Amino acid sequence: MGSFSDKLAAALGIPPAVPPGPIQLKFNEYQKYLRNRVLKTPLPESVHLLDENFPYWIKLRHPNVDMPGEWIGAKASMVIPLLEKGIFDETGFQMDESRALALSNVPALLRSPNCIHKNLRHQEGRDQGGIRGDHIYVEYYGKKNRKVAFTLWDPNLEKVILVSSFWSNKKWVGGCTVMPAIYVRKNSVCTCK
């Protein structure tokens, strides 16, 4: 039958409202709880959570029309204005669920990690592949699971920004970290390698 508002919208020729998809919902959550926050860390550094990094945090991608079967990262300048207006069409886009889930825990991770390391794969003059970032914040979950966050000094913005955060494992983290750790939380032991 439909509600009165649905009938009124149909009578006025207004398309029915589409409920927000998972990408829009994640952006709405980010806007409410994390947008433009500055998080103080034990290094100390102040990490800025900025809109332009949101697509990378959730690994938002769409098919590459020039190379079928390949995916490319979404550009913040294209998706953020649509997400802000609540009119982002998610058709053809995908996000990494593990990254999206890790995002809400970023403040706790940055404020109180088990340890912090320099990023082995992003040292000046070395292209080791992997994720950009000067520092890797690591939180332990059991013997093998790790949650990580990568931070980077952005010379254009003159701020430290959050590059990425996601779940991983001890072996992967061990291959990315410079030892010894530059910070280990009190009453904790660094077990990254």
Image: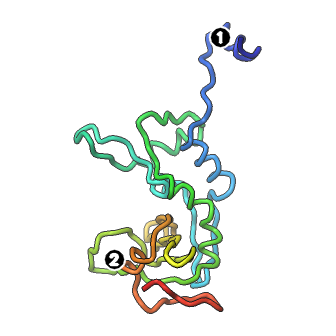
Mark 2: give few (<14), some (14-19) or many (20+) Cα within 10 Å. some
**Quadrant in the rendering for residue 185:** bottom right
* Residue at left offset 61%, top offset 89%: 188
Q: Would residue 5 appear left or right of 99 to someone viewing this image? A: right
Residue that carries the numbered disc 1 in the rendered image: 10
Q: Residue 129: percent from the left, percent from the top?
A: 29, 70
**Residue pushed farthest left?**
67
Q: Residue 103: percent from the left, percent from the top?
A: 57, 60
Q: Is residue 110 above or below residue 97?
A: below
**Residue pushed farthest front?**
143
Q: Nearer the viewer, residue 159 or 172?
A: 172
Q: Quadrant of the N terminus?
A: top right
* Residue at left offset 50%, top offset 52%: 97
Q: Residue 19: percent from the left, percent from the top?
A: 62, 31
Q: Residue 191: percent from the left, percent from the top?
A: 49, 86
| Residue 159 in sight from this viewpoint | no
**Quadrant in the rendering for residue 140:** bottom right
**Quadrant in the rendering for residue 118:** bottom left
| Numbered mark located on residue 121 in the image | 2
* Mark 1 element type: helix
| Numbered mark located on residue 112 in the image | none
Q: Nearer the viewer, residue 95 or 162?
A: 95
* Residue at left offset 26%, top offset 74%: 127
Q: Quadrant of the C terminus?
A: bottom left
Residue type at numbered disc 2: Arg
Q: Would residue 64 appear left or right of 181 to someone viewing this image? A: left
| Residue 92 in sight from this viewpoint | yes
* Residue at left offset 68%, top offset 56%: 33
Q: Nearer the viewer, residue 4 or 38?
A: 4
**Residue pushed farthest right?**
4
